[in-house]
Image (cartoon, coloured by chain):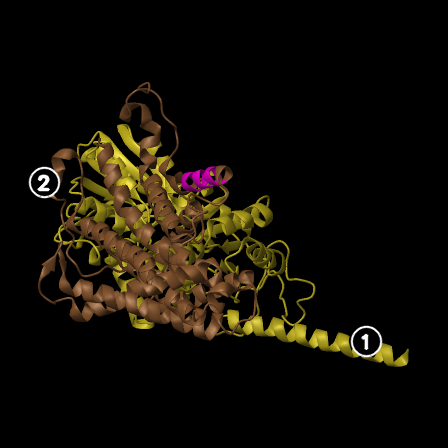
Amino acid sequence: MSVLEFLANGLVFSSIIVLSSIGLSLVYSIADFANFAHGDTMTVGAYAALVTFGFVGALGGEVLGLPLGFFVALAVGVGVAAVVAVVTHKLVYEPLDVDSIGLLITSIGVAFVYRAVIQLGFGTGFIEFEITLLRPIEALLPYGIRMTLHDVAIVVSAAVLVAGLHTLLQYTDLGRKMRATADNPSLARVSGIRTGRIELWTWIIGAGLAGAGGVFLGLYNNISPRMGFNILLVVFAAVILGGIGSVYGAMAGGFLIGMINQLTPLLPRLGQELPLIPESFGIPIGIEYANAIAFLIMVAVLLLRPSGIAGEEAT
Amino acid sequence: MGDDSNIGRRDVLKATGAGALVVTAGCVSTTDDTATPTETDAGGGGGDDDTATPTDGDDMNEGPYSIGMVNSLTGSLSAFGQRNERGMELALADVNETTINGRELDIIVEDSESQAQSGVSAAQKLVNQDGVPFVIGAVGSGVSLSIYESVIQGTDVVQLSQNSTSPDLTNFPGLLRMSPTGSTQSTALSDIIAEDGYDSVAMAWVNNDYGQGLAETFRSEWDGDIAYDQPHDQGQSSYSSTVSGMANSEADAWLFITYQPEFTAMAQEAFSNGYEAQFYGADSVQGSDVLDNTPEGSLDGMKVVVPSAAVSQENYQNFAAEFESEYGESPTSWSAFAYDCVVTAALSIATADEFTGAALQETVRDVTRPEGQEVFTFAEAMEVLGEDGTPSDIDYQGVSGPIDFDENGDPVGFLQILTVDGHEYTQTGTISG
């Protein structure tokens, strides 16, 4: 029995949650509504990658146990998710003259449309990338850590994407404009920033990250039409925990929620796993309540810090 | 005033006309190729408003015997309903080819819309209006129970459910069913795992009525140790904690009572974590999607029990062939259950002294039980029975299995054991009991 094993599981799952949360938070900060279609945007990305992988899967070379074709498919998944989100923005959200609650409800409708279209094309069943599943990395086994190269690939890719986003926001012209628009759209506009264009870029980046999250979720689990919707509530918990609208908060929130979700099995046996606590101590709770625990912690954090972990910092 | 009464009368006439039309239409669509009116001998008799159907006296002996069927023609279980319909049609054709001592069988089908309330109305119509002494119904367990409790209980009418599998129905001995209770799977799994020499098992079950029911029976049947006994929710994005938990329980036998996508995710997780264990599963984890999405060889040796028709029996093979030529696809166990319901009903009528609920109650169980000659088809049974056979002369072996209703009105379960070999399911045994 190894705590490290559960921590490793948590790290992989967190990476996927982080990718999804930052996209959601980014869109919230600039488009100013909670996008319930975010989960299904992930699904769109996953299916786009699946189809692409069917064509380019055989592309040679291997990085971290994944054929190069997978990375091409990943890029296509990201691109398709971004295009779909931009088209939706142009066709639906932009022409709608409603407040953020109206947009929120609209986005639920949009989510149903995405999912229905996917079900029309691919059926309601589940499917898998045609990538051979790997066995755990031998070198880590003595430590009780059971990770495959694919798990490492998920974590590394998430880290690269997060670092990239950080660089973009902090050191580029576009990033500065995005932060300005998020802070105060009217002020940004009078100082000469074309906020409409910034909003488009936000959609591209946010939905692209969602697409990447979807592709990795598909690699980690299975691809099915409900995959994105099923994970959406957890992602929302992460975003709100971090402080909605804050990208760095979403990273922290995503990491925390993912970890809590995967560490739940340890709760009934806390005493055996942690030093300084009596052996028999434990919180008797089953793993079916993992999400409930995540939400409880979210509520607790919000009671102490109403704006979330990083709510004050504007990005 | 004059105008008003005029309109009123016209409305009445219209309504009556429409009513008559509906009744007639019902008559045409439910009486199998014969325009002969429905005979109703049993208590209740023909409804008062049933004027479009001329009802004859009790002494009429040429008309068909009418029984009722409540089926899920629409609603969430309509897929089952359609299979039932096909099984019933084939059985009806077989029965009426031989005839029940010269008289045909007629089934009045009503739709339950897969819901308790509509099911009860349908059964009420059948019992009180059509006066049938025998009701086949229903598909959903909740629907069957509601019908039993609000329409059948306290009357002589026989109710035989075609597809309900909830263990709850066992508590109602008056409510018969053709499909074995889901708990037979747990019993069978417990026997198989013990036979394979394991004394400790890790069990993951899906957190709903189905998973809870099967897990509960397994716990009461299993004598060994249950090292891991945890539910999981459907549609989660990660099942790593379930798999890690099972592995850390250090049991060598892992039992999965869950659905296909969830099981697939767990099997993949177990593979990429490098865990090796002997897998067992209930019927809901078996399917080609599971094999397609798991690595070759990762499931080898896994054993699954699935409810099954008596696939090795000749009568099932004939049924399957007939089904295929009629509908272009192979039958499921569910259509076999519906088929057997109709044949059992026909046999109970053939052996009863009179066509009443009380008389049928006396015969319906016995025609399927041992200590009679084993018969495999309706025609064969009628031959053995001859002119004045009694229910104990025959033991009907259905296309779905031996039936043999027990004191709770449950049939003997008939299960197949499938073992994964070379990443394919192969049948390695059958279990009845």
Q: Residue at x 52, y 67 (%)?
A: B62
Q: Quadrant of residue A122?
A: bottom left
From which residue to which does the magenta span run? A293-302
In depth, the one of A111 and B29 nearer the eye is A111
Q: Quadrant of the N terminus of chain B?
A: bottom right
Q: Which disc is residue A139 wearing?
A: 2
Give the chain of mark 2: A
Q: Which disc is residue B8 wearing?
A: 1
In depth, the one of B175 and A34 nearer the eye is A34
Q: Residue at x 53, y 53 (%)?
A: B354
In the picture, one chain is yellow; tell me its letter: B
* Colour assignment, chain A: brown
Give the chain of mark 1: B
Q: Residue at x 22, y 66 (%)?
A: A73
Q: Quadrant of the C terminus of chain B?
A: top left
Specify few, some or many for label 1: CA neighbours under 10 Å numbering under 14, 14-19, or 20 or more.
few
User: Looking at the image, can residue B112 be seen?
Assistant: yes
- Judged from this view, the residue extending furthest toward the top is A278
Q: Nearer the viewer, mark 1 or mark 2?
A: 2
Specify few, some or many for label 2: CA neighbours under 10 Å numbering under 14, 14-19, or 20 or more.
few
Residue A176 part of the magenta-drawn span: no
Location of residue A236 in the rendering, given as x and y in whole percent from the top left corner: 43, 51
User: Looking at the image, can residue B95 be seen?
Assistant: no
